[in-house]
Amino acid sequence: MGKITLITGGIRSGKSSYALTLASGKESKVFIATSLPFDDEMKVRIERHKKERDASFQTIEEPIHLASALKSVRHDMDIIIVDCIAVWLGNIFHFRKQVSMEMPEISNFLNAIKKFSIRTVIITNEVNMGLVDRTTLNRCYQDIIGMVNKQLAYMANDVVLMVSGIPVIIKNSTRF
């Protein structure tokens, strides 16, 4: 398994910008984007994120099959950024219309990460620091994100919590 850095935090906390700083100076970079342009606001956000990345990034847009996206990456790349696990899980919820803790997309992704040898930066949202939602679907979403985040944090060499644009190191196996 290659070195994994998990970046978590609230919405708009600076996770993606921090991930890009970790990739700066690397020659061969891949960005796996999970967002779908469901509405005009999301289209604008996606375009803004694209402009933040320099031309040295190869971009793979994959909203559902992250394991397949990882397997498609050449093994000589320096770094991969996966943005964002919470959005990816939301996409799965949206298209399945029925969810459970046992979803093959999740186990396929986690197994692919374990076998992956390239430096990987994974971005996710920390959604379980607030209130428990009133609806069953949203509680299930929170539970699944929490479960996936825990598994990724366990596998990760480094875990960073972004707070108001400031990286707070939670787990550090080596210096960045």
Image (cartoon, rainbow, N blue to C red):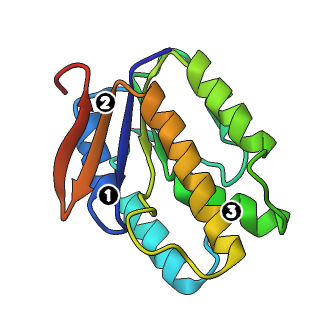
Q: What amino acid is at disc 3?
A: Asn
Residue drawn at the location 56% of the way across and 54% of the way down: 145
In this figure, which residue is indicated by the disc labeled 3? 91
Residue 158 lies in quadrant: top left
Local packing at callout 1 (Cα closer than 10 Å; few below 14, some 14-19, many 20+) is: few
The picture places residue 95, in percent across and down from the top left corner, at 80, 65
On the image, numbered disc 1 is attached to which residue? 52
**Hey, which residue is sitting farthest bottom in the picture?**
40
Q: Earlier in the sequence, mark 2 or mark 3?
A: 3
Gap between marks 3 and 1 measured at Cα:
23 Å
Asked if residue 34 can be seen in this view, the reply is no
| Residue displayed at 52% across by 76% down | 42
For the residues bearing labels 2 and 3, Cβ distance under 8 angstroms? no
Q: How far apart are marks 1 and 2 (CA)?
A: 24 Å
Q: Residue 158 carries which label?
A: 2
Query: Which quarter of the figure has residue 72?
Result: top right
In x, y percent, where is residue 4?
41, 27
167 and 35: which is toward the camera: 167
Question: Is residue 46 something that shows in the picture?
Answer: yes
Under mark 2, the amino acid is Asp
**In this view, the mark in front (3 or 1):** 3
In the rendered image of this protein, does residue 51 appear above or below residue 170? Answer: below
Q: Which of marks 1 and 2 is in front?
A: 2
Three-letter residue code for mark 1: Glu
Q: Residues within 10 Å of mark 3 (few under 14, many from 20)?
A: some
Quick one: label 3 or label 1, which is nearer the N terminus? 1
Instruction: Quarter of the image for the C terminus: give it.
Output: top left
